[in-house]
Image (spheres, helix red, strand yellow):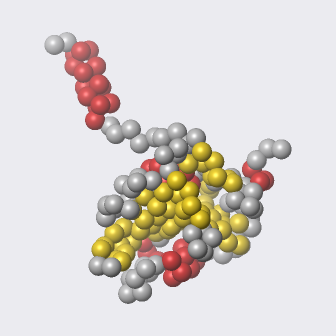
């Protein structure tokens, strides 16, 4: 076999082995405050008793809430507050050293926190994201797996969160 055929064969095998994680984000949800988010066609939206909007697939549940944001605050503080407000198991302790501050697509500042949670004896991974949308509004997303112990659709969740848009970002 020639070198060129080997390279092509290797390329085809690699393409076949790489899972396709990109999904079309064909649906759009619009909150009353004008913030929008895109999500995949196969995901459902629902409003819970606390008025949080949930985005759910067969594998993942994510809810998003908004809060006032002050650019002078440390973004890690928003993660800590969300952890305290939304954890199931009060014995789980927050570890500020595990907060990762970085960027997400067009957002120059985001924070994420992954930890192990327990509910009714079942342990699973949980994630909290803080995304300042502008100088006044911060999005908090809490993500949990539905059927597995780990968040298997993390790439899709990040793609969804990257589409958050405020009225200011939307052309008239």
Residue at the image point whose x is 54% and y is 81% from the top? 85
Q: Is residue 64 visible?
A: no
The quarter of the image holding the N terminus is: top left
Q: Residue 45 in the image: x percent, y percent? A: 56, 56
Residue occupying the far left of the picture: 1
The answer to whether 6 appears left or right of 98 in the picture is left
Q: Residue 105 in the image: x percent, y percent? A: 58, 49
Residue occupying the far bottom of the picture: 91
Res. 49 image quadrant: bottom right
The answer to whether 123 appears left or right of 77 in the picture is left
| Total number of numbered discs in the rendering | 0
Q: Residue 124 in the image: x percent, y percent? A: 34, 69
Q: Nearer the viewer, residue 115 or 108?
A: 115
Res. 50 image quadrant: bottom right
Residue occupying the far right of the picture: 172
Residue at the image point whose x is 74% and y is 67% from the top? 136
- In this rendering, the answer to whether 142 lies above or below 157 is below
Q: Residue 97 in the image: x percent, y percent? A: 43, 75
Residue at the image point whose x is 52% and y is 53% from the top? 44
Q: Nearer the viewer, residue 7 or 168?
A: 168
The answer to whether 115 appears left or right of 1 in the picture is right
The quarter of the image holding the C terminus is: top right
Q: Is residue 142 visible?
A: yes
Residue at the image point whose x is 58% and y is 41% from the top? 26
């Amino acid at each position: 076999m020639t070198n060129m055929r080997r390279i092509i064969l290797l390329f085809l095998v690699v393409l076949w082995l790489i899972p396709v994680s990109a999904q079309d984000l064909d649906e759009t949800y619009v909150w009353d405050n004008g913030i929008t988010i895109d999500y995949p066609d196969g995901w459902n939206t629902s409003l819970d008793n606390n008025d949080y909007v949930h985005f759910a697939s067969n594998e993942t549940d994510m809810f998003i809430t908004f809060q006032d944001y002050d650019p002078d605050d440390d973004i890690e503080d928003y993660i800590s507050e969300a952890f305290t407000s939304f954890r199931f198991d009060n014995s789980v302790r927050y570890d500020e050293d595990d907060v990762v501050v970085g960027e997400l697509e067009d957002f120059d500042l985001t924070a994420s926190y992954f930890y192990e949670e327990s509910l009714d004896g079942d342990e699973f991974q949980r994630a909290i994201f803080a995304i300042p949308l502008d100088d006044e509004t911060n999005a908090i997303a809490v993500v949990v797996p539905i059927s597995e112990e780990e968040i298997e659709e993390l790439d899709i969740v990040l793609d969804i969160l990257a589409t958050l848009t405020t009225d200011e970002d939307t052309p008239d």
